[in-house]
Amino acid sequence: MFLKHKSNGQLVEVLTLDSMYDPCLKEITGRMHAGEEMQDPETFMKSELIFPSGESLPICWLDPHYQEGSSPNKSKAAVG
């Protein structure tokens, strides 16, 4: 899976898909795709990543409390 880094727009290949889907984990291991040489794996904050189309990641991948009424992200979505 490829995602885009918000700050620099470069593609990041997600190497740990299971951590991508786990809302309790805030980081994933990935590899930047820049230049022609294979880059070393790095740790990326999920909050710094978006889909290549520009869409945000699903809240269920980021917030372990997304189904509870106390989730700050859920209350923002309900208001907006």
Image (cartoon, rainbow, N blue to C red):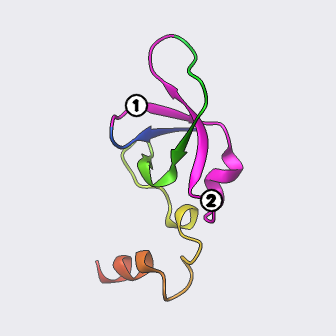
Q: Nearer the viewer, residue 79 or 6?
A: 6
Give the total of numbered labels.
2
Name the spot of residue 46 as percent of width and height, x first: 51, 52
Q: List x then y, in percent, for residue 36.
A: 49, 10
Residue at the top extreme, as displayed? 36
What amino acid is at disc 2? Leu
Q: Is residue 48 above or below residue 26?
A: above
- Residue at the image position 62 percent from the left and 59 percent from the top: 25
Q: For residue 15, which quarter of the picture?
A: top right
> Which callout, 1 or 2, points to the residue nearer the camera?
2
- Residue 32 lies within the magenta run: yes
User: What is the C-alpha distance between the residues marked 1 and 2?
Assistant: 22 Å
1 or 2: tag closer to the N-terminus: 1
Residue type marked 1: Gln
Q: Which residue is mark 2?
A: 25
| 65 shown above or below 48 | below
Query: What SS does tag 2 mark?
Result: loop
Pinpoint residue 66: horizontal percent, then vertical percent.
Answer: 54, 76
- Position of residue 62 in the picture relative to residue 55 (left or right): right
> Can you say which quadrant of the picture contains the C terminus?
bottom left
Task: Name the image quarter holding the N terminus.
Answer: top right
- Name the residue: 56% across, 57% down: 26
Query: Is the residue 39 above or below the residue 55 in the image?
Result: above
Report x, y in % for residue 75.
39, 83
The residue located at (36%, 43%) in the rendering is: 6
Give the farthest residue toward the bottom.
69
Q: Nearer the viewer, residue 26 or 78?
A: 26
Q: Pick out the residue farthest to the left.
A: 80
Disc 1 designates what residue?
10
Mark 1 and mark 2 residues within 8 Å of each other at the beta carbon: no
Q: Is residue 43 magenta?
A: no
- The stretch in magenta equals 8-36
